[in-house]
């Protein structure tokens, strides 16, 4: 089952469900956020609640996308209570890259490994514990709150001071926090964990700066379990023609960490278990156009697609205008 959100002519949110071969408006749902809270408070699964509510008229979701009526598949009434976060060095990459990585880890001494390689090795060794214990914690970063979330189809804005603005095709976990502080998974979505890779490459301590950028997720949320082996395509379109295209892999079969381990190390912090909050937690990637020497330009369109997640996630790149920030004493 896939769920999404569109706005009607009066900007009212309508929840859309793709179920049993049909795409229809869900009855009696003000938003995916309110639907998730209702499921939590009634003790029902989200899928069961959706089926109980029933469906109304059919909708052309692709047409709504073209018309700009398809919005982020979950939001929060207060942007400050939606958190965009992510984790990296979690994916194994292609078979050749994986073999090369293992050879380097075996051949080189500890003192010659970069911090990134050391972190990757920790994940390989203990990112998927099988005995019920907690695995090693991954790299983690913060991207911002709901003010940084960009709807499918809307521009990802690279600040005027950025060195680069590049895509990262990822799967994101979508969560709401229950009234008792329990993290509740709504489902999974495609995401573009848009980053400044040039700044990050200057010095790894600049990672935090490089990640404070827009992100987009959706257009649809997959309700249910995450497929173990996800195959997708990431591309950049310039002036209507494909500039760059590459397959990407995700799902636990292609990762060095389990989803449960990544979730544990995010939600172990009480600050991320505040009742009512929404979390979009991105799980990482091994595919970047930047790694192939591509520099995206204003107007380029990033497109991330995978058959498991419905419609592709598309966002054009926009360069932000210069701003003057003055700190004033009170």
Image: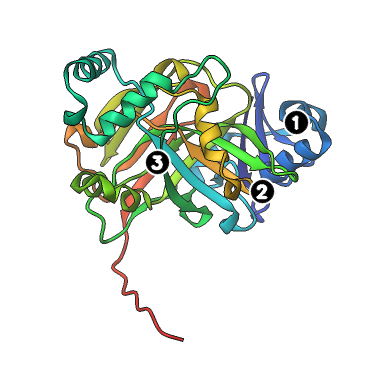
* Disc 3 element: loop
Taking the image as shown, residue 198 lies to the left or right of residue 66, namely left
In the picture, residue 35 is in which quadrant? top right
Q: Which residue is label 3 attached to?
A: 193
Q: Position of residue 245 (x, y in %)?
A: 27, 28
Judged by depth in the image, the label closer to the viewer, 2 or 3, is 3
Q: Is residue 122 visible?
A: yes
- The image quarter containing residue 133 is top right
Residue pictured at 35% horizontal, 36% vertical: 168
Picture quadrant of residue 284:
top left
x 62%, y 58%: residue: 78
Q: Is residue 81 above or below residue 121?
A: below
Q: Give the CA distance from mark 3 to mark 1.
A: 29 Å
Label 3 or label 1, whichever lies nearer to me, is 3
Q: Secondary structure at mark 2?
A: strand
Helix, strand or loop for disc 1: helix
Mark 2 lies on residue: 13
Closest to the observer: 19 or 277?
Answer: 277
Q: Nearer the viewer, residue 184 or 7?
A: 184
């Amino acid at each position: 089952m896939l769920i999404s959100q569109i706005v009607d002519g009066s900007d009212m949110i309508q929840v859309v469900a793709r179920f049993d071969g049909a795409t229809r408006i869900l009855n009696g749902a003000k938003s995916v956020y309110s639907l998730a809270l209702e499921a939590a408070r009634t003790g029902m699964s989200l899928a069961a609640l959706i089926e109980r509510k029933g469906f109304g008229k059919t909708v052309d979701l692709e047409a709504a996308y073209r018309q700009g009526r398809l919005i982020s598949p979950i939001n929060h009434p207060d942007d400050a209570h939606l958190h965009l976060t992510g984790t990296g060095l979690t994916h194994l990459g292609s078979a050749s890259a994986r073999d090369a990585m293992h050879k380097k880890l075996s051949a080189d001494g500890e003192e010659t490994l970069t911090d990134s390689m050391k972190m990757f090795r920790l994940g390989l060794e203990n990112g998927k514990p099988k005995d019920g214990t907690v695995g090693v914690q991954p790299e983690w970063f913060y991207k911002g709150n709901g003010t940084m979330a960009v709807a499918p189809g809307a521009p990802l804005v690279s600040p005027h001071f950025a060195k680069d603005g590049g895509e990262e095709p990822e799967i994101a976990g979508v969560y709401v926090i229950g009234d008792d502080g329990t993290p509740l998974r709504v489902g999974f979505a495609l995401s573009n964990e848009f980053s400044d890779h040039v700044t990050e490459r200057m010095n790894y301590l600049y990672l935090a700066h490089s990640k404070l950028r827009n992100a987009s997720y959706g257009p649809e949320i997959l309700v249910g379990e995450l497929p173990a082996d996800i195959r997708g395509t990431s591309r950049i379109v310039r002036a209507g023609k494909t500039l760059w295209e590459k397959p990407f892999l995700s799902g636990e079969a292609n990762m060095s960490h389990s989803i449960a381990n990544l979730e544990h190390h995010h939600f172990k912090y009480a600050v991320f278990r505040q009742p009512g909050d929404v979390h979009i937690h991105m799980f990482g990637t091994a595919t970047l156009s930047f790694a192939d020497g591509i520099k995206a330009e204003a107007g380029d369109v990033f497109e991330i697609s995978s058959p498991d997640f419905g419609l592709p996630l598309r966002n054009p790149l926009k360069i932000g205008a210069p701003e003057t920030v003055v700190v004033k004493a009170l």
